[in-house]
């Protein structure tokens, strides 16, 4: 009997020592520095602990050995009260231990991407930007012209393109509603859509903030007098639906080519916007400058000369052509 008890005591001692060794080894694996040589952004795949480990191991955060994954599984279960693991694009520090990795998986902030929609881009151009933006997911229905607000949008890896486009369109709806509510009323701008169309023309005509209210005033004065708006950007849009520059200067043939957007041919505003106007262009359309201006032409210095009479306008045109002929900057 004594031999039996001694044998059982020895087995118990071995088991205890083995457990202590196992715990000590697991603790060492859990806290030792990892092999990652420098900080790295890693996309942690969806699918739970197994998918997360596969992503991390492939990215070089864990060594390729037989015991790291079992220890990782046990560590995930033992630390479950600390929170769920997140599938996201995360930044891990150099030589991150398993303990640090689990902290980042639970509490790290996802990497933020940014997509800028510049003012004056057409729906075709915006669709191309959205299609080419990295880290987005899925397809989308191309936006209607003028429906996207030009801004810089933050998003995380895996965000749906359709969801981001919806945010852009909600932003435009808010901006247009704000501009319409605070506008100076004008009978020739009967609804928010007309204001959007006018703002899109202002956006494409000038990049100078101080000129935008003046351009809006020219178009409004022409509408009041029943004059054709004669806006070159509308002619270009009618020819290529916003695909970009024509690649050549507008010709006489271009100006007389009948399209729904050619304001040298059609009366009034075109049937829809020709781009997505920014907040400044919306504000200019809602609060145009005062004055009797009916004409404007480029001055060769990045801006325009405005005139209330055809005579003054023709003089400005002659001055611009002389400037071009002189080759002066």
Image (spheres, helix red, strand yellow):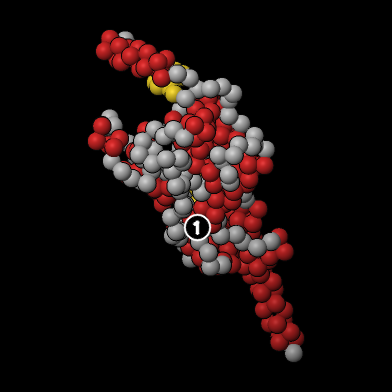
Q: Is residue 287 visible?
A: yes
Residue at the location (54% across, 57% down)? 163
Image position of 224 with respect to 260: above or below = above
Residue at the location (29% across, 37% down)? 256
Q: Which residue is mark 1?
A: 162
Q: Position of residue 306 (x, y in %)?
A: 46, 19
Per the image, label 1 sits on a secondary structure element best described as: helix
Using the image as rendered, state which of residue 84 and residue 202 is in the foreground: 202
Using the image as rendered, state which of residue 105 and residue 200 is in the foreground: 200
Q: Quadrant of the C terminus?
A: top left
Residue at the location (72% across, 64% down)? 81
Using the image as rendered, state which of residue 316 and residue 97 is in the foreground: 316
Image position of 276 with respect to 105: above or below = above
Image position of 165 with respect to 78: above or below = above
Identify the image quadrant of residue 229: top left
Q: Position of residue 198 (x, y in %)?
A: 51, 38
Q: Is residue 125 left or right of residue 72?
A: left
Residue at the location (49% across, 42% down)? 197
Task: Give the tally of numbered discs.
Answer: 1
Image position of 159 with respect to 208: above or below = below
Q: Is residue 158 visible?
A: no
User: Residue farthest to the bottom?
Assistant: 1
Q: Is residue 136 left or right of residue 300?
A: right
Q: Position of residue 233 (x, y in %)?
A: 38, 35
Q: Position of residue 199 (x, y in %)?
A: 52, 37
Q: Quadrant of the N terminus?
A: bottom right
Using the image as rendered, state which of residue 153 and residue 30 is in the foreground: 153
Q: Is residue 175 left or right of residue 318?
A: right
10 Å crowding of disc 1: few (<14), some (14-19), many (20+): some
């Amino acid at each position: 009997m004594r031999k039996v008890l001694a044998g059982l005591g020895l087995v118990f001692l071995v088991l205890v020592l083995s457990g202590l060794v196992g715990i000590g080894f697991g603790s060492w694996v859990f806290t030792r520095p990892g092999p990652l040589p420098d900080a790295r952004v890693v996309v942690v795949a969806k699918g739970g602990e197994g998918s997360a480990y596969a992503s991390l191991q492939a990215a070089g955060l864990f060594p390729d050995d037989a015991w790291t994954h079992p220890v990782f599984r046990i560590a995930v279960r033992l630390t479950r009260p600390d929170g769920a693991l997140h599938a996201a694009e995360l930044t891990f520090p150099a030589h991150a231990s398993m303990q640090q990795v689990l902290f980042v998986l639970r509490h790290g902030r996802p990497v933020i991407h940014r997509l800028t929609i510049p003012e004056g881009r057409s729906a075709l151009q915006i669709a191309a930007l959205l299609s080419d933006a990295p880290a987005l997911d899925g397809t989308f229905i191309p936006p209607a012209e003028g429906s996207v607000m030009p801004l810089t949008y933050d998003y995380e890896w895996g965000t749906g393109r359709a969801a981001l486009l919806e945010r852009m369109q909600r932003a435009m709806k808010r901006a247009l509603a704000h501009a319409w509510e605070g506008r100076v009323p004008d009978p020739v701008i009967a609804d928010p859509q007309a204001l959007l169309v006018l703002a899109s023309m202002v956006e494409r005509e000038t990049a100078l903030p101080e000129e935008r209210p003046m351009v809006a005033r020219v178009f409004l004065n022409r509408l009041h007098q029943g004059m054709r708006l004669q806006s070159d950007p509308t002619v270009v849009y009618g020819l290529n639906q916003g695909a970009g520059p024509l690649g050549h200067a507008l010709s006489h043939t271009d100006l007389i080519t009948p399209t729904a957007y050619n304001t040298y041919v059609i009366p009034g505003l075109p049937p829809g916007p020709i781009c997505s106007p920014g907040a400044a262009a919306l504000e200019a359309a809602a609060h145009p400058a005062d004055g009797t201006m009916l004409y404007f032409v480029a001055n060769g210095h990045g801006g325009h000369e405005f005139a209330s009479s055809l005579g003054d306008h023709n003089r400005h045109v002659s001055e611009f052509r002389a400037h071009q002929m002189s080759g002066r900057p």
